[in-house]
Amino acid sequence: MRTKSLDDESVRAWQRTSSTTEHLIRCTRVFYVLGFLPLNLLLISADVFFGKTQYGLRQWSWKTRIFRFLIANVVWALNPGTRPVMDVLSKKARSSTGSLKPDQGAHRASYVEVPPRPDKLFGDAIHPSVAPEEVPCFWQWLESMPSPLLDISPDQRANQKVMMYFVGGAMVQGHPIQSPLPYVLMAKTSIPIFGVNFRKAITPATAFPAALQDAVAAFYYLLAQGYSAKNICIMGDSGGAGIVLTTLLYLRHHELDL
């Protein structure tokens, strides 16, 4: 499925679109896809028969082309805008521990507000419209593990491993508490998670380098708590993985702690 890339103005136009309008667009697109589905099935069949590549690679089967076509059109129909579907910017949303799922009953979480570290920001981590802010973070551990807040003394932290986590969500949504990944990882490694609820890039004031500033602040918070840099792992999925790589490259480039 071919489409033009969005420019800045078209993205801003979508961000100004009301939710009602977006729902109407979704409904219109769904009816459009269903209405033209029979015709597209014939065209895909012709594509395969004549060895063309309008609907996929030459080696793809008819079933593969149909499947890819349907997936692409469903995504296109149900995602008409760029605005996140949930509140990810307010203080209440960013600091809330939310509700854990039933299969995470042994999962414990505690909120921590990490102070900004403007003294560790250089080069690309500085931008006139993005100011360093306090970062909502969350200690996460299993009931079977010692609590990183109560059971591990400052003297013991130097030898204790910890995992910083950056949630996925295209860097415009997501909350570390709501992701199943920390729970699965803790069950396998018995390492506590420090989830960083970094600023999501949906306004000029929270766009890059806001997430990088938050990551640097969280890293130096753990160092200040007594954790050794060599025992701090860093993990992210999807958009969060991009922040992980950006943070590691930033720390190395400016010869900071690694």
Image: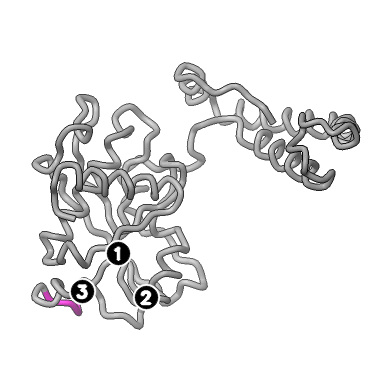
Whether residue 89 is in magenta: the answer is: no
Between residue 220 and residue 251, name the one nearer to us. Answer: 251
From the image, tell me which residue sits under label 2.
Answer: 189
> Looking at the picture, which amino acid does disc 3 mark?
Gln
Residue nearer the viewer, 226 or 90: 226
Local crowd at mark 2 within 10 Å, few (<14), some, or many (≥20)?
Answer: few
Q: Mark 1 and mark 3 in contact? Answer it, CB < 8 Å.
A: no
> Are the residues flagged by discs 2 and 3 in contact, CB closer than 8 Å?
no
Q: Where are the magenta residues, as a range? A: 149-153
Residue 160: give its label: 3
* Mark 1 element type: strand
Of the residues shown, which amino acid type is indicated by label 2? Answer: Thr
Q: At 73% across and 28% down in the image, what residue appears? A: 28
Q: Residues within 10 Å of mark 3 (few under 14, many from 20)?
A: some
Within-10-Å neighbours for mark 1: few <14, some 14–19, many 20+: many
Whichever of labels 2 and 1 marks the residue nearer the N terminus, that label is: 1
The location of residue 256, given as percent across then percent down, is 13, 49
Q: Quadrant of the N terminus?
A: top right
Q: Position of residue 206 (x, y in %)?
A: 31, 34
Q: Which residue does the numbered mark 1 point to in the structure image?
A: 163
What x and y, as percent, mark residue 4? Answer: 60, 21
Q: Which of these two is toward me, 87 or 143?
A: 143
